[in-house]
Amino acid sequence: MTDPVSRPTNFIRHIIDKDLTDGVHDHVATRFPPEPNGYLHIGHAKSICLNFGIAEDYEGTCNLRFDDTNPEKEDIDFVNSIKQDVQWLGFQWQGKELYSSDYFDQLHGYAVELIEKGLAFVDFSSQDEIREMRGTLTAPGVNSPYRDTAVTENLMHFEKMKNGEYAEGECCLRAKIEMTSAFMCMRDPVIYRIKFAHHHQTLDKWCIYPMYDFTHCISDAIEGITHSLCTLEFQDNRRLYDWVIENISIECIPRQYEFSRLNLEYTVLSKRRLIQLVDDNHVSGWDDPRMPTIAGIRRRGYSPASIREFCQRIGVTKMDNMVEMSMLEACIRDELNANAKRRMAVLEPVKLVIENFSNDEWLDAPNHPVNEEMGTRKVPFTKEIFIEADDFREQANKKYKRLVLGKEVRLRNAYVIKAERVEKDENGNVVCIYCSYDADTLGKDPADGRKVKGVIHWVSASHALNAEVRLYNTLFTVPNPAAEEDFAGTINPQSLVVVNAKVEPSLLEFEPLQGIQFERQGYFCRDVDTTDDKLIFNRTVELRDSFAKFGS
Ligand code: ATP
Ligand code: MG
């Protein structure tokens, strides 16, 4: 067994280390158990990195198990998207993917065993009556009138349930534990219910379905899971988890350990809310780049490595907290700062004419400011170019380091120009800036020692390509939308801003999703909506310090 050195340690790894040292286990087996009722989100990535990461580091195994006990809400499309997302994140499960429904026969057998042991009974009370009898956190529950039904009768009723002889809601199977327990989950929990539903795996074989708490622990035991890692809301349910395992004839004794879920500012990480965003068309779909889903984040331009890095940086603890969005953004920014090629794109173009320039040139421009190995590219320089409207002012104080009427600025990768005069439309907006250029400033300072501080980016008007650029901001206007009564009411109307940009022709060379820095603007990637007629880019993340770098 190799030392788990490649990832930072945490309390779960300490538990595993101790179990291995004490001989409780001689191997490690984990699982990632998504319910196929939605797409995976960045919170799931935390659980994926934890479970698969531990399996990798301890040379153990990690299963992918679909927790599919709610046929009405689940779907094969979700199964497929989840498999794709786990692999995209860089992980591979042990063997074939598994399903809780693979164990429906065994689960049924264990339910019969509990009935035979007098530890489960069929209850004909209505759902409301069962809820009523359960009591509250401060008041104990009361026993169901069906609690003491004879074993043989319970077996007969359960068999009838299975055979479809009772209607949905007419009865259910409950574990017989303790109605006065301080843990609500121990108050004779329902373990099987009737549902005449078609199941994406078992089709129409079953009309009774086991509940999560009964299914999960037994599935873990069947698969020989050693450490069953889940989020803190299952802390109380651990009593039930252990109770079921102790009371059935099964050899493996898995243990459940809980860690805190990831909460991320300015977004929601609950499938119920994400489904609402999709169903109510607040976003374009599960893979809308504003969504915190793996599919959305991928389309936005995040790499698998950046998400794994994020999961490492946030760590694994038992403390509930809210992680800042900037933590996630820093991970992709750090990566793209090192790896992304630089390009020029003008997002809000205004025309600029260099009156004393006539012969088009192709200039060499480095692909990266420090990494020379990333090479150079040719950039067309022409008499007419576009610059950002915001990079020009008729008048400005000294702090403004861009182009000002009567003053000079450097065009990135090109010459120093001077703004001579402007042309305006009837509303007084500048529509064209007329400039002169100093031919002796390509790759060097002006010969007479004039200081030109500002650098702005540009593209050739005749060679530039049109592109739609999608600028994303946070999807919500408040840090914790889930705490709002109407979370959808806090959706940011500026979460998507679309601009028509002019971009360097060499941008055609990039693969979809490949990260690119648009100089002075941020990191971008080509969107999957791009067609032969229309180039579309997504802004992955802004530059940390947009202007400091080039001193403009
Ligand atoms: P949601 O509350 O978003 O519907 P869930 O817990 O019901 O999520 P599952 O498909 O059951 O979704 O989750 C699979 C695994 O991922 C579980 O082990 C769960 O604990 C874990 N998980 C879900 N959300 C988070 C999160 N925000 N942070 C960490 N782990 C999570
Ligand atoms: Mg769940």
Image: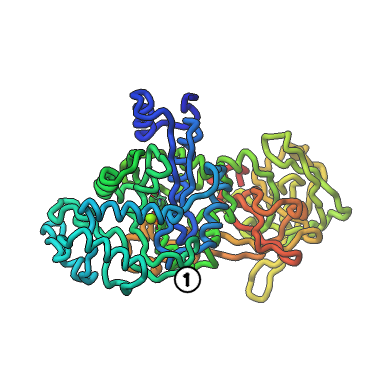
Q: Which residue lies furthest to the bottom in this view?
A: 426
Q: In this view, does 330 lie above or below 273?
A: above
Rendered residue at 64%/71% (across/down): 428
Residue 461 x/y as whole percent:
77, 60
Q: Nearer the viewer, residue 447 or 319?
A: 319
In the displayed structure image, the side of residue 227 where residue 125 appears, left or right: left
SS for tag 1? helix
The quarter holding residue 152 reads bottom left
Residue 278 versus residue 225: which sits nearer the camera? 225
User: 446 above or below 145?
Assistant: above
Quarter of the rendered image showing ligand 2: bottom left
Name the residue nearer the viewer: 240 or 336.
240
Q: In which quarter of the image is residue 256?
A: top left
**Which residue is label 1 attached to?**
279
Residue 493, given in percent of the width and then of the height, sits at 47, 68
Q: In this view, does 539 lie to the left or right of 99?
A: right
| Placement of 485 over or under 371, stated as above or below | below
Residue 405 x/y as whole percent:
67, 57
Distance from mark 1 CB to nearest ligand 1 atom below 8 Å: no
Q: Nearer the viewer, residue 443 or 499?
A: 499
Give the residue type that dot 1 points to: Asp
Colouring scheme applied when the structure was drawn: rainbow
User: Does residue 235 show up?
Assistant: no
In the rendered image, the vertical position of residue 283 relative to residue 376, given as above or below: below
Q: Answer left or right for 54 relative to 389.
A: left
Residue appearing at x 47%, y 45% in the figure: 48
Q: Which residue is drawn at 74% across and 44% down?
A: 413
Answer whether residue 249 is visible to the viewer in this image.
Answer: yes
> What x and y, as percent, mark residue 142?
12, 61
